[in-house]
Image (spheres, rainbow, N blue to C red):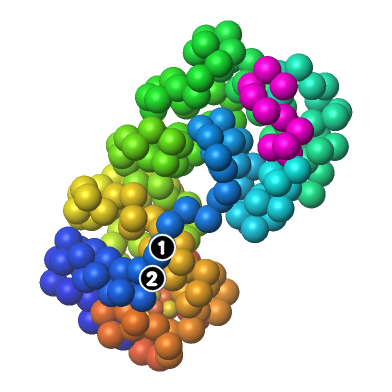
Amino acid sequence: MGTPLESRGEQAEEVITRLEEAYPDSTISLRYSNRLELLIAVMLSAQCTDERVNKETKHLFEKYDGPEAYAAVSQEELAEDLNSITYYNNKAKYIRSACTTIIEEHDGEVPDTMDELTELSGVGRKTANVVLQHAHDVVEGIVVDTHVQRLSRRLGLTNEEYPEPIEQDLMGIVPEGYWQQFTHLCIDHGRATCTARNPDCADCVLADICPSAKDDSEIDLASGEPW
Ligand code: SF4
C-alpha cells in the first residue's frame, strides 16, 4: 500500500498540495447568482448530481425570483417544476417552508449564521456550511459531502464514518485557510479519479501516500471492505 505521512496533519497538507497542482481551478460547480439561488441549489443537490441541478435551476431561477415566489406557489406546482430532481416532493416542501421562514423571520434575506440557517427546513450543517462559505464568506467548518467522506477515509485522514465527526477530525488537521478549498479538491478528485466504485489508483497523484491504493492494499478504507 501507499505509505501515508507520519502524522495526519502532514498527510492532509501533502494531499492538499498535490490536489491543488492537479486541480488549480477547483471551485463550486453549482450555478447561482444570489444567496437564495445558492441556498436552493444546495438543497436540491442532496442525493442528486450538480449537473442535473444546474440543468433544472436554469428554468427554475427564471420563474421564481425571490422567497415570496416560492412561498406563494402551491406544493403541486413547485414539485412539478422540480420533477427531474431526486426527492422532488420533499425538496419542494422544504424550499417553500424555508422561504416562508426567510420572509417571516429574516426580512426576506438568507440568514448568515449556522444556527439560523440550520433552523430552516431541510437545511443541515453541510448545506449551511456551503451557504456560509460561498454566500457570506464565513468559513466555520468543512463541508463533508460523499466525496470528502470517501476520500478522507481512503487517505487515512479519519476513521470516523459519519459527516459530523469526520468534519471535526478534518478541522483538527486541515489548515484553516484551506477549509473551503479542501472540499472542492476532494470533489474534483473524487469525480475524476477516486470514484466510489472503481477508483483509478494506477493513475492517481496520491497513490504513493494512500493507504487504500488498490495495487498494494486489499482493503478500501472508505468501506472497510476488500476491493
Ligand atoms: S484513487 Fe486510489 S490511490 Fe488515489 S486516493 Fe483514491 S483510493 Fe487512493
What whole-number distance in Å separates the C-alpha atoms at marks 2 and 1?
5 Å
Residue type of the residue flagged with mark 1: Ser
Look at the numbered disc 1 and give the secondary structure of its residue.
Answer: loop
Question: Which residue is located at x 41 percent, y 62 percent?
Answer: 26
Main SS, magenta region, reads helix
Q: Nearer the viewer, residue 187 or 222?
A: 187
Q: Is residue 97 above or below residue 51?
A: above
Residue 38: give x, y in percent of width and height.
54, 38
Question: Which residue is located at x 57 percent, y 43 percent?
Answer: 32
Q: Quadrant of residue 10?
A: bottom left
Mark 2 touches mark 1? (CB < 8 Å): yes
Query: Is residue 67 a member of the stretch shown in magenta?
Result: yes
Q: Which residue is mark 1?
A: 26
Q: Could you tell me how many numbered marks the image carries?
A: 2
- In the image, 166: left or right of 83? left
Which disc number belongs to residue 181? Answer: none
Residue 179: give x, y in percent of width and height.
29, 50
Q: Which residue is mark 2?
A: 23
Q: Which residues are magenta?
A: 60-69
Q: Sort mark 1 into few (<14), some (14-19) or many (20+) by Cα contacts within 10 Å.
A: some
Residue type of the residue flagged with mark 2: Tyr
Q: Quadrant of the N terminus?
A: bottom left
